[in-house]
Image (tube, rainbow, N blue to C red):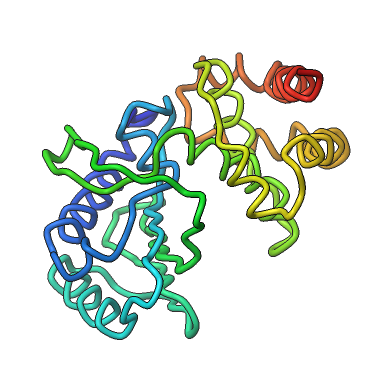
Amino acid sequence: MILPRSEDALHKAQLYRLLIEIIDDHDIASQVFFKGGSCAAMLGFLDRFSIDLDFDVKKNTDKKTIDFKLNKIFHKLGLEVKQKSRRTLFYLLKYHSSGQFRNTIKLSLIDQALKSNIYQHQYLFEIDRYAVCQTKETMFANKLVAVTDRYQKYKTIAGRDIYDIHHFFIQGYPYHASIIEERTAMTSHAYLIKLVKFIEKKVTDKIITQDLNFLLPQDQFHIMRKVLVQEVLMFLKRDIEL
């Protein structure tokens, strides 16, 4: 995973320490699947910094046991739980950091693993560990849906979602249409049409700037902010026409 700013080195270290403890705990690791931006970046599927940890959780997993084990890990690493969901395994964790630097990690373990999701054992060379991860085709499909899903649930738009879609297209990655169909109850073709209209109407330069400014090297950020939305729309419209 790249490190755009030297002051984010501590955050990356804290993120990796937490991930190592989760993977090394068999009771947790056997029930979860690594996913999201950090997973994609660590596997070389993305070229940006990522600040959170995200997992899918197997159905019928004992959440109380997972929560208990996670809290032991938090205590071991000196992480303070600043916020915790009552319904899901979501935690906002704080670590000590000097000055105005980043000092929180979002850890999310969601029990919504789709039937269409595909996972496989992958080697995370930066931490010298294996983990069961979403495939890049699974990540891409879920990322396409995340743009509108995030807005429907939280009324927010993440510029990083647009960036990730762009990068996956540029790399020539395929995506599993069945995941889009399972998550949206629409054909992938119909959903892409909806996504194009959503991006054209809702995604602004301000959204792109606020989210990506700290996740990319500055030279790369300034290049991408000018072309990102236009090129994503171009790629989506191409797939609609196929």
Q: Nearer the viewer, residue 108 or 209?
A: 108
Question: Which residue is found at the position 81% from the left and 33% from the top?
Answer: 196
Q: Place residue 183 in its image quadrant.
A: bottom right
- Above or below, 37 relative to 99: above
Q: Place residue 217 in its image quadrant.
A: top left
Q: Nearer the viewer, residue 113 or 53?
A: 113
Question: Which residue is found at the position 31% from the left and 85% from the top?
Answer: 64
Q: Place residue 63 in its image quadrant.
A: bottom left
Q: Is residue 236 left or right of residue 70?
A: right
- Above or below, 103 relative to 81: above
Q: Nearer the viewer, residue 64 or 91?
A: 64
Query: How many numbered marks, from 0 up?
Result: 0
Q: Nearer the viewer, residue 107 or 23?
A: 23
x, y percentage for residue 187?
Answer: 75, 43
Q: Quadrant of the N terminus?
A: top left
x, y percentage for residue 37?
Answer: 44, 41
Q: Quadrant of the C terminus?
A: top right
Q: Is residue 238 left or right of residue 141?
A: right
x, y percentage for residue 35?
Answer: 40, 48
Question: Which residue is found at the position 48% from the left and 34% from the top?
Answer: 137
- Above or below, 106 relative to 160: below
Q: Is residue 96 left or right of residue 221?
A: left
Question: Which residue is found at the position 34% from the left and 65% from the top?
Answer: 94
